[in-house]
Amino acid sequence: MSERRYTLMHKDNPCAVVIFGSEGKIDGYKLTDPMYAPFLGNCDIQKFSRWWAMRAVPASRTLMRRVMQDAGVLTPEEYLEKNLALSITDTYWVCPQDAGLTYEDVRFSNFSRHGALQIPYHNATSYDMNASLGGQMEKYWDLGGKVPVLIKESSHYFGQQAINEVFATRLHQMQNTSIPFVVYSAARTSDGILVSKCPTFTTEQIELIPAYEIIESSKIRTDQNLYHAYIDLAVSHGIDRSVMQDFMDYQTLTDFLISNTDEHLLNFGVLRDSESMRLTGPAPIFDSGNSMFYTDERTVPYTRVELLQRKITSFYQTEEKMLANVSNKKILRLDCIPTPEQVMEFYSRAGIPEEKASFISRNYEIKASFLDEFLHGKKISLYQEKQKEKEANYHPSSSRQTSNIQRFVMIVGKSAAEVRKKAEELLHQFEQCGYSVLDSSSLYPAIQADKDCAIVADPYQIAAKRIAQTDGKPARYITYVSIDNIQSEREKQDLPTSEDLTFVTACARIRQAMLNGDSVIFSVSNPDSEILRNILRILPSSHPVSKELVALVRVPQSIEERSSDSEIIVEGEEDMRYSFSDLSAGWDLMKTMEENP
């Protein structure tokens, strides 16, 4: 295909001459009027080539591949050229030279004049207003109402991206903030796909300029702070500094709270008057779907260290560096954010499975605690969190255990006496931190297992029948469940010896205690693989529980005797070795302690 000459237009103002080669690629570019050109007028051929590629719809979209095939083009860039690069969010377009077209001929507000939301195309059938709609999700504009509405399909991860958009909207509404934000709603289509919907915040008089264009409009020193450079550039083009700083601080804080990992420089920006070309203010917050751990398949919540290690896409790759730039910490009100319980209820009601909703809520609670510390003057530091994690001893007053999350601690070892001793030490530490220790025997009598399991001893079915009870117990309490103690109870009551029924009793007590709000210490000597691998199945998933495994180990005396640094060794008549890698699924914390001599 021979080269094709176009004029880059901003409404009816020529900006540059563009030469297209094969497959819609840029072969030539000459700036003619910097006042109206992209990148605030500082646009050369390299920048324009990037601008053009970002404007095109990603070829990875399933629908886009079919559209390109029907249109007889090979690339999204070629399809963009075919549709004159028209967009809902700004007034740029490309006009074939000598075509004699004006902006009045091609603007989308004229669609309704021609029926079926189409307008004449200079050498084909119609213009597609979605040809410039970037991003990875399937999306399209609905022009049937008074203002265009963006529809984004969310067909994966239980539709959570669409749900996240609504959650972010609720968060901003609870803040009663002056910071602008887009209001999203969600609906399910006739074919079962969840979609999010939002009205456009642009018009033919107000257009969106992404942050990427602002940053690339000026040469930034390698040692310059990008966060503040972006604010400075926006201010230099007419936006009030305090307005810009408050917006960026609020967006950064709320992105941290909802764990938005995708705040790249095309996902926020500023608004511009398309006539005067003066920037008018920050664009409202939009596109928060890639948040709240939507792709995670794990059920164990992240630790504080793990949360700060997650990479994000923004000016910087870590949330720690983003938070370090926040100036106005009062711009976010922590007393006006959803509680973890409200988060759990919101996602459960939206159709997210209970286990995933609990995972989301528990991570959110940790992020909220981070923000509480940060807004009260504490620095958020991955290095410091790593140091605290290394230095923290295993006791209730450690930094890891200061939240209101219930704890389930299982202690295993060779010697029943050593296991009991370690459990007593830990119970004493809980008492020193204000907990009341409760006996578990009244939660489920040992003899009840014989009645419930007359045919089949199924600990998980029995545990599942427990219901929550309230009895006015103190707010902080710990219940102790011991396999050895249950065996002793059975002996005293002249009940037959049965490992299966003992385990049924333990599971029922643990489940009942957790439903009642207790934290639980569960001790067992010489555990078999059934207990180690399946005990977590009985814990309720309706609320946060920290799951911790402590193994009392015999330390090998020689290198030859040590089979692996990653093994828990429980020694009986024959050594039983349980690999950490096999047991790690589901546990938040695994710790080995050498048995006392």
Image: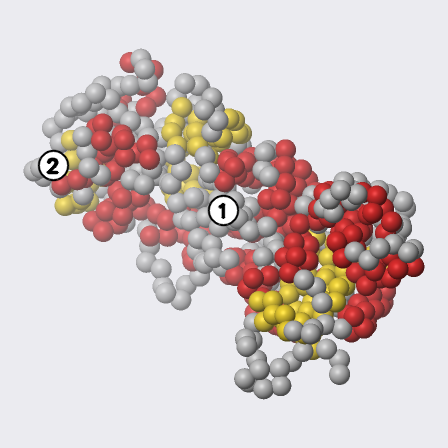
Residue 404 appears in the picture as rendered:
no
Tell me what residue is drawn at x 31 percent, y 13 percent: 115
Q: Residue at x 50, y 36 (%)?
A: 159
- 276 to the left or right of 383: left
Most foreground residue, 46 or 188: 188
Q: Which residue is under mark 1?
A: 295
Nearer to me, 155 or 399: 155
Q: Do the residues under discs 1 and 2 have CB atoms within 8 angstroms?
A: no
Mark 1, other Cα within 10 Å: few <14 / some 14–19 / many ≥20: few
- Give 442 or 75, whichever is nearer the viewer: 442
In the image, residue 68 sits, relative to residue 387, either above or below, namely above
Q: From what the image shows, is residue 474 above or below residue 157?
A: below
Left or right: 71 as drawn, with respect to 193:
left
SS class of the residue under badge 2?
strand
- Give coordinates of residue 553: x percent, y percent: 67, 75
Instruction: Decide if residue 56 is on the left or right side of residue 238.
Output: left
Residue most toward the left?
A: 2
Mark 2 belongs to which amino acid? Arg
Q: Position of residue 472 (x, y in %)?
A: 90, 46
Is residue 22 shown above or below 481?
above
Three-letter residue code for mark 1: Thr
Circle 2 crowding by C-alpha within 10 Å: few under 14, some 14–19, many from 20: some
Query: Which quadrant of the structure image shows residue 91?
Result: top left
Residue 289 appears in the figure = yes
Instruction: Work out whether residue 81 or residue 528 is closer to the camera in this orientation and state it.
Output: 528
Which of disc 2 and disc 1 is earlier in sequence?
A: 2
Residue drawn at 11 percent across, 28 percent down: 98
Residue with the mark numbered 2: 4
Tell me the mark number nearer the camera, choosing from 1 and 2: 1
Query: Where does the image place residue 560, in percent across and percent down from the top left?
Result: 54, 84
